Amino acid sequence: MKGRLTLWNLLGALLFLIGLAVFLYAARRPPDRVENPPEPVVEAEAEPREVELKLYFAGREGFVLERRTVRLSPFESVLNRALVELVKGPGIAGASPLLPPKSPPPRAFVAGRTVYLDLPGAYRKLGYGVRGESFLLYGLANTALANAEADEVRFLLEGRPAMALIHLSLADPIRRAR
């Protein structure tokens, strides 16, 4: 009977220990979830005020820009109000809504020069094709960039980073055109 301390047994044990170290290191990584998202955007103004919002809706050949003047209540965010108004639908001819009526608006967070839009899980069940999903994501991103001092928009799905809504990737941010 051969001894147990052979070259192949030593290599097998070394490979096992390397695999165990990789497994333990991967288990310590933080989860792919936003545990403590930034606080919602709150304006510093304490007085009601009127602002002009820029809302992007779907049109025949691309996006239709609607400028809508609204009165914000004290401490109401311009960005969050713009998203609420976007869900309400267009008020001009030639524009189509991005979402069905009574859909929940996404929650918006700002960190540095990045807007995070947290999409509700119901957006996965809209049944949109590639074109409809493109209008939805880019309409939300264009509206967010037009109403916030930011350079890019990143999407979350139910508080977590997601690879895609249905058809389109959410991995990369949508950046402001230069």
Image: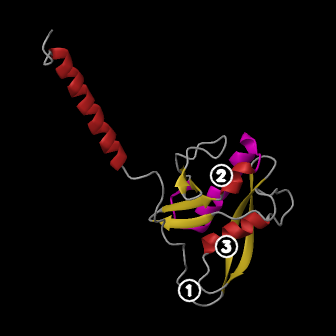
Taking the view exactly as shown, the residue that stands out farthest to the top is 1
**Label 2 sits on what residue type?**
Tyr
Q: Amino acid at mark 3?
A: Arg
Determine whether 85 is above or below 128 in the image: below
Instruction: Tell me the tag on residue 45.
Output: 1
Q: Main secondary structure of the magenta part?
A: helix
**Residue that mark 2 sits on:** 138
Q: Secondary structure at mark 1?
A: loop
Q: Quadrant of residue 159?
A: bottom right
**In front here: 44 or 21?**
21
Question: Residue at the front extreme?
Answer: 1
The N terminus sits in image quarter: top left
In the image, residue 144 lies in the stretch drawn in magenta: yes
Marks 1 & 2, CB-CB < 8 Å contact? no
- Residue that mark 3 sits on: 81
Question: Where in the figure is residue 69, as x and y percent of width and height?
Answer: 73, 76
Name the image quarter holding residue 155: bottom right
**Toward the viewer: 104 or 131?**
104
Q: Earlier in the sequence, mark 3 or mark 2?
A: 3
Q: Which residues are magenta?
A: 126-155
Gap between marks 3 and 1, in whole Å?
14 Å
